[in-house]
Structures are given as C-alpha cells and as structure tokens.
Image (tube, helix red, strand yellow):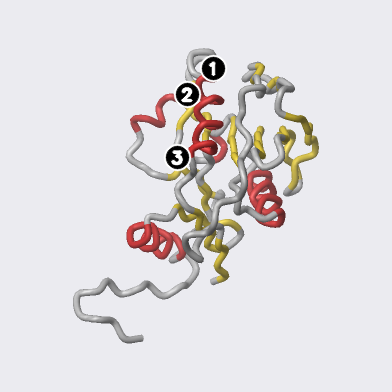
Amino acid sequence: MSVSPGARPRPRPRPGNLREIAETIEETTGLRVQIVGGKLVMSPTPRGKHAGVVWLIRRQLDGVLPEGLEAFEVSSIALPEDPDDYVTPDLIVLPREWMEDDEWLAAPEDAALAVEVISQSEKSREIRDKADWYAVARVPVLFVIDPRNGTWALHTRPDNGAYQDVLPGKFGESVRLPEPLGIEVATDGFPLYGAAPRRQSGHEGREVDI
C-alpha cells in the first residue's frame, strides 16, 4: 500500500480495529459511520425533515422523563463484549450522569429507549439488521419512525436476538412508551419526506463489508 507524503496511513482492518477505521472515515469525509454486524455503515448528515422528527420527539420527552433520565443526541452505544460494533441512534434515553462521562460509548444496558428515524436512502435489509442489533444488545425499547411513508413501529421485549413485540402505527396515531417511561408520544406533527433528492456522492447509505 503506497501512501502519499504527509497522508495519514489507512489502518488495516482486523478484529477490534474497525472502530479506528470508522473514526478515520468520519474525520476525512464528515459522514456518520456506524458498525453494525461487523460492517461499516456510512450515512450523510441528516436532512432537515429527518432532524425535525428528532426535535419533535425530544421536545415531548424533555422534562417528563422519569427522574434521573435524559434524552441525548449524537451519543453511541456499544455491543456488549464486542471490540467493534456500535451504533449511534438519532436519540437515546440514558442516565443523566452520561453528560459527565468522558467515554464516547455508552453501555446498552443503561439505555431506556433508542429512537431511529429512517433516512430516504436506507434499505429494508439495513433497517432489519439494525433492529436486530438493538435486540441483541437488549435495548428494552426501540422506536423506529419512517417519514418515507408516514409509519412508525415500537419494538419491545428483546429476547433471543429479536424483539418479541412490534406495535405498528401511522403518523397521526399516538404511541405510549412502556413503563418505566410511561410517556405518550404524539406523531401527528411528524413531516413526510418529499421526492428523493439526487445523490451527491456514492457514500450515501453505503454499507461496506470488511
């Protein structure tokens, strides 16, 4: 492998080294990188409507979560005892102490809720793989919102690598998060995506096998 003078050498993939590769990609491209099932999954910065759904959910959670819990954005969680895998949900409910932690990966057992807003470029297999990842990590509640078609799904009771209960719904139908959260989330203000924009690069929604 030749490296131009002054360029940062690209780390070689090996078990436990994918996180280093992910960090390098994020630094050089600005793309958000996650490692799901040993695969690098790259996605662009969320667009306005994507960010708007996250904001609408957080506005409903702030100030009403059980004592000691807060909603955080841009926080990642790791798969237990795995040297590589981690995901960065759009929103995650963690203990308030997380804001004082020097680590960048939170423990999945500390997560009370993960929220994923589907991007326009995501494929069905990628969505299923990520839901299974959360189930394996035993995140108790996964709330998936799809502004492509105005639907949502509440995943609960993770067991044996899958969520045993999945409650589907449509925008306009409220969803009650299970205890200990016990919060009803309104979805009638969630925006729908318009026509899919022209891709600006080949990295959008790209999954890379290592």
Q: In this view, does 17 lie above or below 81?
A: below
Q: Which residue is drawn at 59% across and 40% down?
A: 116
Q: Residue at x 78, y 33 (%)?
A: 168
Q: Mark 3 points at which residue?
A: 75
Given the image, on which type of amino acid does mark 1 rest? Leu
Q: Is mark 2 on a helix, strand or loop?
A: strand
Q: Mark 2 points at which residue?
A: 70
Left/right of residue 61 with respect to residue 188 in the rendered view: left
Residue 69 % position (x, y): 50, 22
Viewer-side residue, 198 vs 148: 198
Q: Name the residue under label 1.
A: 65
Viewer-side residue, 105 vs 143: 143
Given the image, on which type of amino acid does mark 3 rest? Ser
Left/right of residue 26 with respect to residue 191 in the rendered view: left
Residue 156 % position (x, y): 73, 33
Given the image, on which type of amino acid does mark 2 rest? Glu
The Cα atoms of the two marked residues, 2 and 1, are separated by: 7 Å
Q: Are the residues flagged by discs 3 and 1 in contact, CB closer than 8 Å? A: no
Q: Residue at x 38, y 57 (%)?
A: 26
Viewer-side residue, 98 vs 46: 46
Residue 106 % position (x, y): 46, 40
Instruction: Name which of mark 2 and mark 1 comes first in the sequence.
Output: 1
Q: How crowded is mark 3: few (under 14 residues within 10 Å), some or many (20 or more)?
A: some
Instruction: Name which of mark 3 and mark 1 comes first in the sequence.
Output: 1
